[in-house]
Image (spheres, rainbow, N blue to C red):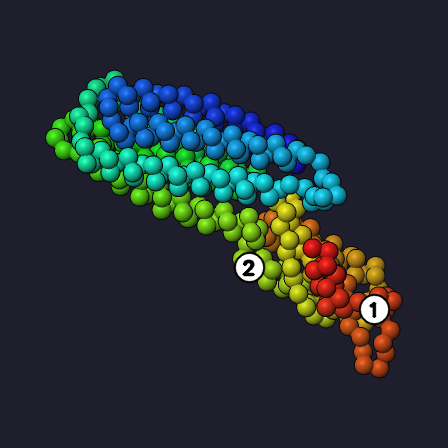
Amino acid sequence: MRDRVKKALLLLALGITVNIALAFIKLYVGLASNSLTIMLDSINSFFDIITCFVTVLAFCVLLRFKSESAPYGYGRSEYLASFVVAVVSCVVGGLFFIRSLNRMAMPEPVWFGVESCVLISVTIPIKLGVGLFYHFANKKLRSKALDAIALDSYLDTAITSATLVSFVISSRVDYAVDAIVGMVLSVVIIVFAVKMVVDSVKAVVSGDVPKDAAERIKDAASKLPCVESVDSVVIHDYGYGEKIAAICVKVKRGVSMEDFDAQRQELFQSVVADLNEEYTPELQLVPKLSQEDNATPYDQNVSCEQDEATETDAE
């Protein structure tokens, strides 16, 4: 876990360095050319720096040791960081739109220059490379926050490309092209950002678990020879590496604890291989009693309802 955090912090440090360079290049070009879209693009890059720092803080929290108040760690801080990235994107989109409306009402000249055009062109493949870098590195790290930053990098690449087109057209068309393109870009940013906010809120509230994960775990558990039926599957998500599947089962009579423990390990391996997730299945043993005999084969007079009530009290 700590190695994963260190790798993520290294990625973020590289991303912050690149974003600082891009932000100042765009700011210089925007001020020199009086291009609204380029200046807004530079502001967007400065916001990217802020979101990277927020994500760094989230990963630093993961370095804290588990405690009584947080027995499963602080993994959900990554989900919170992805939420912050999404909200910042929404704010940037709103600022884009308001500033573009102002420019539409009061058009200003844009001064085209070959040097400015070249500088903006260079930033496009660099930002695309940053997005791809995050995307492929995150295949192993599997971080919701890094995934949001990668998506934001792709969006920035599209924004800068449209900004460059707007800059070139503005030099040839005597109209508020700058403002129109700025409004279109702001709407695109807001749409993508809202989707990111919704996904992030779902992760913060209910965890980042596949929709069919519980059903697939239930199917895997029901196939075990010692299991008569599966009453419920509840997945608790505490972040990367801390996803716990509590499986409430009824066990066939005559099954020994040794057999059950062996099959529980078999279920664990099956679930990990099937879901490609780091779940730690926890089977709450509930033997099925016959009507004639109230004794359990393990002297554990347990029921699913009792387990669920205990879990509710603990929460």
Amino acid of disc 1: Asn
Is residue 16 positioned above or below 145 on the image? above
* Observer-nearest of 241 and 256: 241
SS at circle 2: loop
Determine the image quadrant of residue 214.
Answer: bottom right
Q: Quadrant of the C terminus?
A: bottom right
Label 2 sits on residue:
212
Residue at the image position 77 percent from the left and 72 percent from the top: 288
Determine the image quadrant of residue 171.
Answer: top left
Residue at the image position 37 percent from the left and 34 percent from the top: 156
Q: Are marks 1 and 2 in contact (CB under 8 Å)?
A: no
Is residue 90 positioned above or below 260 on the image? above
Q: Which mark is residue 252?
A: none
Looking at the image, residue 297 sits to the left or right of residue 269; the answer is right
Looking at the image, residue 153 sits to the left or right of residue 217; the answer is left
Which mark is in front, 1 or 2? 1
Is residue 277 positioned above or below 136 on the image? below
Residue at the image position 83 percent from the left and 61 percent from the top: 257
Does the rendering let one see residue 194?
Answer: yes
Determine the image quadrant of residue 154.
Answer: top left
Q: Quadrant of the N terminus?
A: top right
Q: Marks 1 and 2, Cα distance to the nearest angstrom?
A: 31 Å
Looking at the image, residue 144 sits to the left or right of residue 287; the answer is left
Label 1 sits on residue:
301
Mark 2 burial class by Cα count in 10 Å: few <14, some 14-19, many 20+ = few
Residue 182: image location, x then y, percent = 26, 36
Mark 1 burial class by Cα count in 10 Å: few <14, some 14-19, many 20+ = some
Does the rendering let one see residue 266?
Answer: no
* Observer-nearest of 297 and 200: 200
Amino acid of disc 2: Asp
